[in-house]
Amino acid sequence: AQDGFPPFNVEAIADGYRITLALAGFEREALSLTIQGRELVVAGERDVDEAPRAFLHRGIAMRRFRRAFLLGPGLEVVGARFALGLLAIDLRQTPPEPPKRIDIDRSP
């Protein structure tokens, strides 16, 4: 079950949709994007801090994660970029295939 981490937005943009995930403290190299069937999976790995620290408040998640998004029919990922702790994934709707005519052969 997903616990709400990392937080994300889904927004409509001019020619599709954008999913933006807030990933403060992650390096680009620690992130992965995969598509399995119609499921877009975003995962992140974090190295555990070796030095013990005494937090007075710990509000920044320091753990690995896996978040999955079910893509609707015809949606495809066309790009992703990571800057300033935000991972933006752009999706586009591909046009549906036109109906295909199938010829019926005559029986001999």
Image: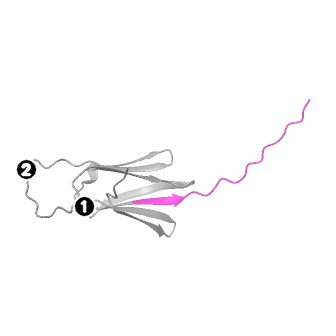
Q: Does the magenta stretch include residue 37?
A: no
User: Which residues lie in the magenta part?
Assistant: 89-108
Q: Name the residue under label 1.
A: 24
Kindly report the secondary structure that dominates the magenta region of the rendered protein: loop
Residue at 73% over, 49% down = 100
Q: Is residue 48 left or right of residue 93?
A: left
Judge by depth and name the residue closer to the eye, 103 or 49. 49
Residue 99 is tagged as: none
Q: Residue 42 in the image: state x and y as whole percent.
A: 37, 51
Residue at 26% over, 64% down = 84
Q: In this view, does 32 lie to the left or right of 63?
A: right
Identify which amino acid the numbered label 1 is placed on: Ala
Q: Residue 51 in the image: state x and y as whole percent.
A: 7, 50
Residue at 41% over, 61% down = 19
Q: In this view, does 97 lie to the left or right of 28?
A: right
Residue 51 is tagged as: 2
Disc 2 to disc 1, how far (Cα)?
Answer: 20 Å
| Disc nearer the start of the sequence (2/1) | 1
Quadrant showing the C terminus: top right
Nearer mark to the viewer, of 2 and 1: 2
Judge by depth and name the residue closer to the eye, 25 or 105. 25
Identify which amino acid the numbered label 2 is placed on: Ala
Q: Residue 80 in the image: state x and y as whole percent.
A: 39, 57
Q: Does the magenta stretch include residue 101?
A: yes
SS at badge 2:
loop
Q: Bin the neighbour count of mark 2 within 10 Å (Cα to Cα): few under 14, some 14-19, many 20 and up.
A: few
Q: Residue 97 in the image: state x and y as whole percent.
A: 66, 53
